[in-house]
Image (cartoon, helix red, strand yellow):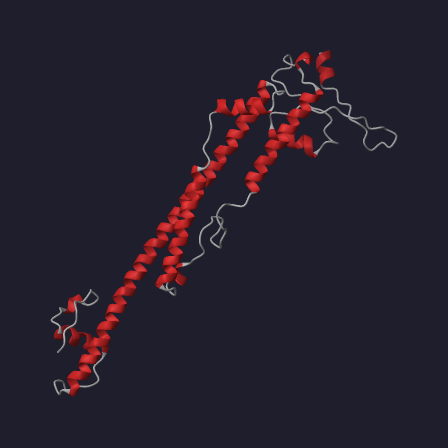
Amino acid sequence: MNELAELYTFEPDQLDDPSEKKKKRDTPMLPKDAVLAEMLQNNKDQIVCYHEHDSLLDHKEEEALSEEDRKAAWAEYEDEKKGLSQMRNAPMAFSQMDMGAQSYVNFNFAALATMSNQQLEELINQGRAKVIEATNSLKSLSPETLEDTIARVWKENPALTETQVQAIALNRQANVEMEIKRREAIYRDILARQQALMNYVQKLINNRKVQQMQQQQMALANQQYQMALQNGILGSPGMNQLELLGLYQQLHGLNPHQMGKNPGPSKGL
């Protein structure tokens, strides 16, 4: 019981006492829990010390790390945190547009109808470039085995214990897996948007071709109608567009149900 009472004795520094001279504290052990590590960093004046153990009987003073070892562990933790922060805050490899959180070329379906065929082709090419970019970004990040990561961490930090090396290696692998999943999600989103864009543009171009052919039919039918009037073949001026189309199809032997289909080469009267 005396050991328990001594273990849980709490005697914090009197920070608000001007007569109390603050002593220099030893560097604390780097905890396995990342949240606790952040608390120790952000609340240095409030957290005096901590003890991390699996059992009250497991802690042995002779196995404790030296001051240099603890500083090295904290330095490695800082490097790991900076690396993760850079990975989270780094600008994405794809330009951010006005399509929400995911990156892609900026377009909306209503605006596509007002664009020329050349502009639509350029937009599709931009989308293809984004797909290639996302593919290369995903392929460039390949996970390594836990054994390889442990070996690399140990080589970089020979002063750390096996437990610390394993914790850092697991943290690195978790970061890589998160980044791979993020890039996979970006790739799937960009690919789906590109496919939707290509399908819509294809339908739009096909409709334009049909409309263009119908306009050409109308113009030719009107021309032939005017010629027929001049030659005295027809005597009822003022035909509407449907009547002109019917006349054009009759003159060229087309079935009325073929309206909108690709017509053959026109023949003279």
Residue 6 at x, y percent in the picture: 74, 16
Residue 217 at x, y percent in the picture: 21, 72
Instruction: Answer above or below: position of 147 versus 205.
Output: above
The quadrant in which the C terminus is found is bottom left
Which quadrant of the figure has residue 153?
top right
Give the residue displayed 72% in from the left and 12% down from the top: 3
Instruction: Answer above or below: position of 196 versus 172.
Output: below
Residue 70 at x, y percent in the picture: 67, 23
The quadrant in which the N terminus is found is top right
Give the residue displayed 76% in from the left and 25% down from the top: 25
Side (left or right) of 168 relative to 107: right
Side (left or right) of 249 relative to 95: left
Residue 30 in view in this figure: no
Give the residue displayed 44% in from the left and 54% down from the top: 105
Q: Total number of numbered labels?
A: 0
Residue 142 in view in this figure: yes
Give the residue furthest to the right. Answer: 19
Instruction: Name the foreground residue: 43 vs 148.
Output: 148
Give the residue displayed 16% in from the left and 76% down from the top: 247
Instruction: Name the foreground residue: 64 vs 49.
Output: 64
